[in-house]
Amino acid sequence: MASGPPSFRQLLGETRFVAEWWAGRRYYSRCESRGEGDAQTVLVIPGFLASDWMTGPLRRALAAAGHDVHGWGLGRNYGLRGGVYEGVRERVTELARRSGRPIVVIGWCLGGLYARANAKLMPEAVARVITLGSP
């Protein structure tokens, strides 16, 4: 496998992000609540170097489906640093207390690792963990 900078063609392939992001926005804006099932309180934790802004389309789609959805509220995810792990644990506890039952935690990439670790330590506060692209 050759090392070095990516080719121009490979760089152009990465621009598909814009088209996929736009298509996702259009899809999520059409999602409507079907009134089926049981609405859940959901916490969405962003991946490494992402923030609540990046999880906005997912949170809007879940809210449109009738769920009570929340971002993690800790700014950009720069990895495990002082206060982050405790902040996630406090957020999970707060949302579970407010809802009166265990919540669903969705973690994207590194956020999925936070979600799984907290669920192990707080099974009474977490009903389900969903990971997206997590190791």
Image (tube, helix red, strand yellow):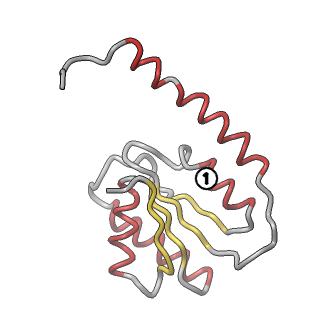
Name, please, the residue furthest toward the front.
1
- Please give the name of the residue rendered at 81% of the width and 67% of the height, measured from the top-left corner: 34
- Please give the name of the residue rendered at 67% of the width and 36% of the height, measured from the top-left corner: 23
- Please give the name of the residue rendered at 18% of the width and 21% of the height, measured from the top-left corner: 3
**Quarter of the figure with the N terminus:** top left
Q: Name the foreground residue: 37 vs 52.
A: 37
Q: x%, y% of residue 106? A: 50, 63
Q: Secondary structure at mark 1?
A: helix
Q: x%, y% of residue 97? A: 55, 83
Q: How many marks?
A: 1
As drawn, 87 above or below 10: below
Task: Tell me if 106 is positioned left or right of 88 in this view.
Answer: right
As drawn, 133 above or below 118: above
Residue annotated with mark 1: 58
Task: Tell me if 86 is positioned left or right of 46 in this view.
Answer: left
Q: x%, y% of residue 55? A: 55, 49
Q: x%, y% of residue 83? A: 32, 61
**Quarter of the figure with the C terminus:** bottom left
Q: Name the foreground residue: 58 vs 68.
A: 58
Residue type marked 1: Leu
Task: Tell me if 42 is positioned left or right of 31 in this view.
Answer: left
Q: Name the foreground residue: 131 vs 51.
A: 131
CA neighbours of label 1 inside 10 A, class few (<14), some (14 to 19), many (20+)? some
Q: Quadrant of residue 117?
A: bottom left
- Please give the name of the residue rendered at 70% of the width and 79% of the height, measured from the top-left corner: 38
As drawn, 27 above or below 116: above
